[in-house]
Image (cartoon, helix red, strand yellow):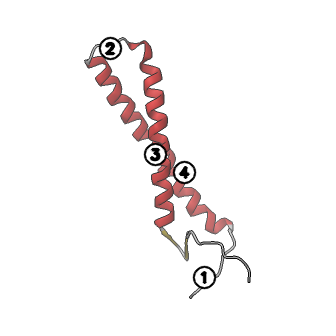
Amino acid sequence: MFEAKELDPTFRRMLPVWWLFAWRGTLCGALLGGLVGFVIALAWMALQISPENLNLVTTIAGGLVGLVWGFVVLRMALRKKYSGFRIALVPVTAAA
């Protein structure tokens, strides 16, 4: 079986991974959370429900969207081929 050489986590290797998390996680997550909050607020008003709990509901919904989106971004990072490397999950084998 072929065993790949492990690379050191240098700044040049970590930067593109961090950037993927930063812009996809933060920017897209904020946009997605804002969109979900907007849709919930529109539905809330259309149904003429008292607005007293709207902030709590949108906060919880935004948190759940952020949690799910975080896993989506993690999967993107694991599937992406970076310049000269990729991230892989490899089993740890016991030393013989």
Q: Is residue 61 above or below residue 78?
A: above
Q: Position of residue 83 (x, y in %)?
A: 53, 73
Q: Is residue 89 above or below residue 4?
A: above
Q: Amino acid at mark 4?
A: Ala
* Residue in front for this viewpoint, 16 or 32: 32
Disc number placed over residue 68 in the picture, else none: 3
Q: Earlier in the sequence, mark 2 or mark 4?
A: 4
Q: Mark 4 or mark 1, which is nearer to you? A: 1
Residue at the outermost bottom position:
1
- Neighbours of disc 2 within 10 Å: few (<14), some (14-19), many (20+): few
Q: Amino acid at mark 3?
A: Val
Residue labelled with disc 4 = 22
Residue labelled with disc 2 = 49
Q: Is residue 15 above or below residue 95?
A: above
Residue drawn at x 61%, y 72% is 91
Q: Position of residue 19 (x, y in %)?
A: 55, 57
Q: Earlier in the sequence, mark 3 or mark 4?
A: 4
Q: Earlier in the sequence, mark 1 or mark 2?
A: 1
Residue drawn at x 26%, y 17% is 47
Residue drawn at x 74%, y 83% is 96
Q: Amino acid at mark 2?
A: Ile
